Image: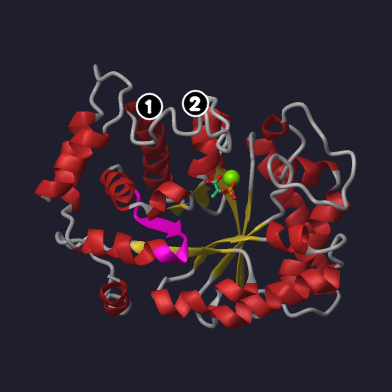
Amino acid sequence: KQAQYRALRDVPTVSLDGVPIGLHMNAGLLVDMPHLAETGAESIGLFRTELQFMLAPRFPRPGVQEQLYRAILEAAGDRPVTFRTLDIGGDKLLPYMKGFEEENPALGWRALRIGLDRPALLRMQLRAFIRAGGGRELRIMVPMVSTVDEYKRTRALFDREVAWCASHGYAPPLSAKLGVMVEVPSLLFQLEEITAAADFLSVGSNDLMQYLYAVDRDNRRVANRFDPLSVGFLRALRSIAAASVRSGTPLTLCGEIGGRPLEAMALLAIGYRQLSMSATAIGPVKAMILTMNVAEATRAVESMLAEGRDDASLREPLEALAGRL
Ligand code: PEP
Ligand code: MG
């Protein structure tokens, strides 16, 4: 199997009926980077910057942050990297930041919420990205956005840092894009506004599932109680894909479901064309896509999602569909 996946590395990712699909890789450390070329992924679709913060004995200084981002961009070569701003809190605690204990951390002071309340920290990281990304295409996305206003406030901080770097003689990025992670369900009801404001969207399906179905993603008693391949979740994901098409705002999905072949098939059927996943998932997902008929899957899944269906798992009918395609 491994050899078979390796052989697919340079094969273009196109479905049987000719639909091109972008496969991207999730990463969080410099040691992940060799997998980019090995897998043939088009880009780093999600770089989880919190890993550096979690492994360090103290809050990494700006120069240390910049050094890592520069090394990541260099290791990526011609392929783009989408850096995610610090996503701490919830399950990801920094040992050197005390007083973070919360009754309900998943709903607490985390990710962008910390960044907007402590803008010096967020600006420090944004500046590190901009300085590292001089002369290159720079892509940044923000986690745990709940309102369009939070995005706009982040955008204002980002624009200010871009201007600061330019006025201090740093080489500007060739282009600078600021995207939004769609992982808090409130954004599903602000899709027109968020697609108009943001440069791109990336669905964090792990958290979106957790918040939409009210199941702690790390609580083994309930984490698998509901299937992401359910009518409700797939309709939610489909509404995001539809908003992306209406507005022309680029869309990726970077949660774990994108790396499972059956789930990836369902995602393609409801309109997703860019998936970012762990390195080991790229071969199996690519092998699935090469034998899949997207138009046919779309027709079949649309009828599974038609009105009148209960919110039951569609896993069995999707498995049957995968066998037929
Ligand atoms: C997600 O929530 O789906 C995601 C990609 O980010 P993380 O798993 O790091 O929260
Ligand atoms: Mg998340």
**Residue 63, how many percent across, how many down?**
84, 73
Residue 213: which numbered mark, if any? Answer: 2
For the residue carrying disc 1, how many other residues have a C-alpha within 10 Å: few (<14), some (14-19), or many (20+)?
Answer: some
In the image, taking residue 23 as reference, residue 158 lies left or right, namely right
Q: Quadrant of the N terminus?
A: bottom left
- Please state which of the two labelled residues, at mark 2 or mark 1, is closer to the viewer: 2
Amino acid type of the residue tagged 2 in the rendering: Tyr
Taking the magenta stretch, the answer to whether it contains residue 278 is yes
Kindly state the secondary structure of the residue where label 1 is placed: helix
| Residues under numbered marks 2 and 1 in contact, where contact means CB atoms less than 8 Å apart | yes
In the image, taking residue 167 as reference, residue 249 lies left or right, namely left
Whole-number angstrom distance, CA of label 2 to CA of label 1: 9 Å
The residue range painted magenta reads 271-280
Taking the magenta stretch, the answer to whether it contains residue 41 is no
Residue at image x 37%, y 26%? 232
**Within the image, what quadrant is residue 152 found in?**
top right
Up-down: is 58 above or below 312? below
Kindly state the secondary structure of the residue where label 2 is placed: helix
Residue at image x 67%, y 79%? 71
| Extreme residue in the left direction | 324
The mark nearer the N terminus, 2 or 1, is: 2
**Residue 99, how many percent across, how many down?**
89, 39
Viewer-side residue, 219 vs 279: 219
Residue at image x 62%, y 82%? 74
**Residue 97, how many percent across, how many down?**
87, 48
Amino acid type of the residue tagged 1 in the rendering: Gly
Residue 232: which numbered mark, if any? Answer: 1
Q: Is residue 134 in view from this perspective?
A: no
Viewer-side residue, 274 vs 39: 39
Residue at image x 37%, y 64%? 282
